[in-house]
Structures are given as C-alpha cells and as structure tokens.
Amino acid sequence: MTDRETRHAELAERYLPDDRLDRFRRRAGAVDRENRFFDEDLVELSEAGYLELFVPEEFGGPGLTLHEVSRLQQRLATAAPATALAINMHLMCVGVVRAMCARGDRSLEYVFAEVMEGEIFAFGISEPANDWVLQGSKTSAVPQPDGGYLLSGTKIFTSLSPVWTRLIVHGLDASDPEAPQLVYGFIERDEPGADGADGSGIDACERIVVSDRWDVLGMRGSQSRATILREARIRPERVARRLPPGRHPDLLTFAITSHFQLLIASVYAGVARRALDVAAAGLRGRTSAKAGVPLAEVPEHRVRLADAHLEFLAVPAQIDAYARDFDELVDHGQGWPLRLVGARIAAATAARRCAETALMCTGGAGFDSDHEASRLYREAAAGLFHPPSADAARPMLAAALLDTDE
Ligand SMILES: Cc1cc2nc3c(=O)[nH]c(=O)nc-3n(C[C@H](O)[C@H](O)[C@H](O)COP(=O)(O)OP(=O)(O)OC[C@H]3O[C@@H](n4cnc5c(N)ncnc54)[C@H](O)[C@@H]3O)c2cc1C
C-alpha cells in the first residue's frame, strides 16, 4: 500500500470503524421508515470528532484535506446516505474556510473556534426555483446602520434542520438599484438580542421558522426542511462577502462550489459502491429454478452487474484526482467548473444506475420497502436535484468545446 492509502485506511479505522458503520447501516432503515433525524449517528460522529475533520491543527483539529474527507464521506455513505449527505453541509462550510485560509484569506477563521466549541453549520443557499443558485437570490438583505443585514425569504432543503446552530446564507441587497449586491454571511440560530427588543416586534422564534412539512422520496433522515427567514440577522462581523449578482470570480464562491460538488459526489459514489455489494449479495443468494445454479452464475446477471461496476469505477478515480488537485492548489482556471460539476453528475448518475442494478439483482425481494436495495434506489434519486442539473450543465460543457477561438 502507498503511504497515502495507508493514511486513508488509518483515518477510516479512526473515524468510521466497521462496527460503527454496521450500527449506522442498521439504523438507516429505521430512520428512513420513521422519517426522523439521525440523532444517534450524530452523537457518535460528534464524539468521534467527525465534525472537526477540516479544522486545521493550529486550531485544535486534525486538519484533514478535502481528499481525505471525501474518502471518509464515501465510506459513511455506504452505510447511511442521508447521514452522509446532511453532515456534508457542515463539513463543507468548514472545508471552505480551510481552503480560503490555505489560499491566504483568513477572514472567516472564527468558524474553526466555533466548530471546536460544538457549533453545527448548515448550508442555506437553495431557494424555490432559483436556478442562479449562488449567483442570485430571491431573499432580501436589508442593510442595517451597524453594517449587518436583515434577511427575509425562503431557503429550501436546509439539511440538518433540527440541529444546526449556524447557517450560511445569501440574500440580495437592492438598496442601491444601480448597484445591487449579493450578501453572503452566517445567521446564528441563538443570536443574542434577536428577541424583539430591537423594536421590530418580531420574536426570535419567528425570525427563523423551520417548515413542518418533510415527507420526501429519499434521504429522509437528512431532514432538509425549508427555512423561512423573517428579518433574520447577519451580524456585521458575520458578513462574509458582498458581490455583484451574476458570475464574478471570488474565492468564497469558488471554495463553496468545489466543496459542494466534490463532497456531494462523494456521497453518491458511496451509494453506488454499496449498491454494487447489495447487487452481488442478491445474485449469490438466489438460485435459478430453470438453470439450477445460483443467479451469480447466470451470464445475463453477471453482465448486468459487470456493466454497472464498469460505470462506477471511473467515479471515485475522478473525485480523487480533482480533490487532490484542489488540495494541492492546482489552477485549472476555467476548467474547474467542468471538472467539479462533471464529477458530481457522473457520481449521481452512477448511483442511480447501480441502485437500479441492485434492485434487479435482488429481485422482487429487493422491491420490499424494508429492503436496502429499495431504500438505496430512493436515496440515489435525490441526486437528480442537486444544482446544477445536467440540463443546466450542458451549455457549459458544449461551450468549452464549441465556443472557443480555435
Ligand atoms: C436531500 C436533499 C438535500 C439538500 N440539502 C440542501 C442543503 O442543505 N442546502 C441547500 O442549500 N440546498 C440543499 N439541497 C437543494 C438542492 O441542492 C436544490 O437546490 C433544490 O433541490 C432545487 O430545488 P428546485 O428549484 O427544483 O425547487 P422547487 O421545486 O422550487 O421547491 C422544492 C421544494 O421546496 C419547498 N418549497 C418551495 N417553495 C416553498 C415555500 N415558499 N415555502 C416553503 N417551502 C417551499 C417545497 O417542499 C418544494 O417541494 C438539497 C436537495 C436534496 C434533494
């Protein structure tokens, strides 16, 4: 084994040993069936220091790289995809700050101390039908005399909704119609002073309201409920950026995009990997009455599994390569979005393909809603909804080849 692979194996043993993964996998079915949050997994992950993975050593953490965290997230997702998807949002926020520091911008390093104190970060960017995603917002950000902002709007699919204490959000400051600004910053759930005593008449509990509606097809344990903001405050020292709407190169948004795409890709790579194992177990465990041999020996089934395996193999390799490049500060320039989005779409596509293969290989038994194959199929379907969709990415992929001067 290379030094690097030995290190990955040590990290897996330290943070996600086999017995812990087994417990997570056993619980994942119940969490899904009961449509509840993964409280027990979170306790175990917190105690193991998993929420601190990205915190640099100088701030008391283990200082893992994006590549190392990606491998762990792939492993976690083989057991509990919804847990992995939701905890991704916290990891992503911390990883973004680590990456900014590595590139010389230490303006958000207070996040590390807060993580070490037990704060849980979440990602409140998605809004209803806002296909600008990071580059636009339907949420209003009203500037305050102290330099802070009051945000009003709806954020959808806020994973970790029962437990987050810090939410990275964006909103549009249109106070100057000639020069609107997108504001990025952190909302604190327990923000001191947000008790209506500011004369707004809005109680703290009304400023951030979590939707009571959450009954979705897959990734149910992530409890990614909508969050309604009503004059929710970003304190002046928690404002991270002010940028013009649209495409403007910036380190914060680049770091968010990189971590979002590669860590989401990691989750679906883990789903795909597990689905292949479930598929293989299904073929080994069933015998063809006609052929009189296990289905594992029937050529059509072997080919089906082999094809899914082939599609999967490129996925972790792609994630590994791009995560390592990101850690090593490789400058792919305009080539970064293609790589990042390409890796995430490929991983989500492979997850759906492998999950369908698992269903076919486990047969009618796999169609039972309590069977892991059935749940993996539904978890994989969530991969259709992470931005940008394949439709949204195609113009960029085509333009990279067609709309050049050559
Ligand atoms: C499992 C999962 C977890 C995700 N986690 C995150 C995350 O942590 N952070 C993040 O930023 N993005 C997250 N996303 C969002 C995702 O990346 C996409 O941005 C989003 O799915 C795109 O939605 P849309 O435009 O198709 O939504 P739309 O079709 O516009 O809306 C989707 C859903 O949002 C809710 N909704 C819409 N409007 C309102 C409203 N006015 N009031 C209340 N609820 C409303 C409804 O439930 C609706 O079905 C997650 C997605 C999934 C599938």
Image (cartoon, rainbow, N blue to C red):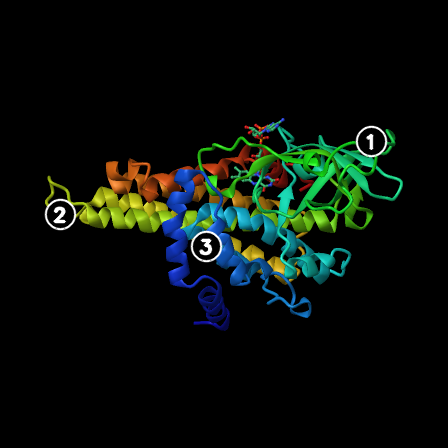
Quarter holding the N terminus?
Answer: bottom left
Local secondary structure at mark 3: helix
Residue tagged 2 = 293
Identity of the amino acid at label 1? Ala
Mark 1 crowd level (few <14, some 14–19, many ≥20, 10 Å Cα) = some
Ligand number 1: quarter of image: top right
Task: Determine the residue positioned at 34% across, 49% down.
Answer: 276
Identity of the amino acid at label 2? Val
Residue 91, placed above or below residue 300: below
Question: Where is residue 65 drawn, in percent x and y?
Answer: 59, 62
Local secondary structure at mark 1: loop
Question: Where is residue 211 drawn, in percent x and y?
Answer: 58, 32
Residues at marks 1 and 2, CA–CA distance in whole angstroms: 69 Å
Residues at marks 1 and 3, CA–CA distance in whole angstroms: 42 Å
Checking the image for residue 76, the label placed there is 3
Residues at marks 2 and 3, CA–CA distance in whole angstroms: 34 Å
Residue tagged 1 = 174
Question: Where is residue 332 drawn, in percent x and y?
Answer: 65, 53
